[in-house]
Amino acid sequence: QSVLTQPPSASGTPGQRVTISCSGSSSNIGSNPVDWYQQLPGTAPRLLIYSHNQRPSGVPDRFSASKSGTSASLAISGLQSEDEADYYCAAWDDSLNGLWVFGGGTKLTVL
Amino acid sequence: QVQLVQSGAEVKKPGASVKVSCKASGYTFSGSPMHWVRQAPGQGLEWMGWINGDNAGYSPKFQGRVSITRDTFATTVYMDLSSLRSEDTAVYYCVKSGGEYWGQGTLVTVSS
């Protein structure tokens, strides 16, 4: 099982706002920034959000993120069919000598 | 532009080793750590380790079986995984520190 916990699935209709949660601990989300990735089938993950709520160039502002304590969430507003993908949260974990930990992924279906 | 180009797919027998390369270009290679992440079929992302300068760090899960090295002159990072088993069948990605740039992935299949 993954160090960070995400719901396995989420869904929404076009135009709707959906959120995906990510739960961790004090050694990862509680003390480090959270990144979010989108992965379309057969492709490498794409960075959506870094350092809590920064978007790389080209990522629409429909994607936003927040963090509170040891939990984080990704919000997608104005849902579009092309948003159907797997989403992963990630954070550095300060335990041991440090390691990069991921959530198990959330499959988002656009109904 | 930043590019990470990985070596091609591999088929290995159980117990063998595999070495995957990641050729980097478009940025200052020596100044940026590199991670390796793998994804088994239908599964999530799993961090294996990273190299930062001449120092490498590994996930406890792979400690003793994985080795990450780099050739600064060739701007290439290598990931060696030994004692392969069927559960190591996965796509292996190199990822530039920061997470914005990923290699295209290398499928490693372990089968007798």
Image (cartoon, helix red, strand yellow):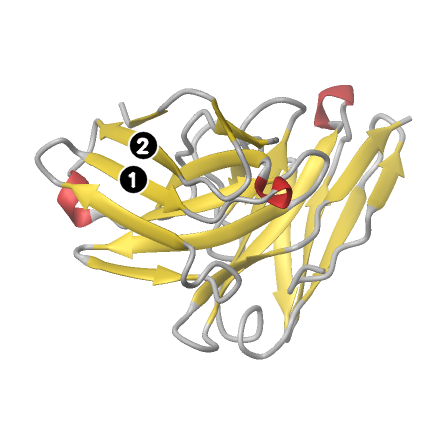
Left or right relative to B54: residue B12: right
Residue at the far left: name it: B73
Give the mark nearest the N terminus, 1 or 2.
2
Image quadrant of residue B45? top right
The residue that mark 2 highlights is B21
Disc 1 marks which amino acid?
A: Tyr
Left or right relative to A68: residue A12: right
* Residue ID at (12%, 40%): B72
Q: Position of residue A106 (x, y in %)?
A: 76, 44
Q: Position of residue B102 (x, y in %)?
A: 42, 33
> Where, quadrant-wise, is the C terminus of chain B in this rendering?
top right
The residue that mark 1 highlights is B78
* Residue ID at (82%, 28%): A15
* Residue ID at (87%, 37%): A11
Q: Position of residue B24 (x, y in %)?
A: 25, 30
Q: Chain of mark 1?
A: B
Q: Residues within 10 Å of mark 2 (few under 14, many from 20)?
A: many
Image quadrant of residue A1? bottom right
Q: Chain of mark 2?
A: B
Left or right relative to B3: residue A102: right
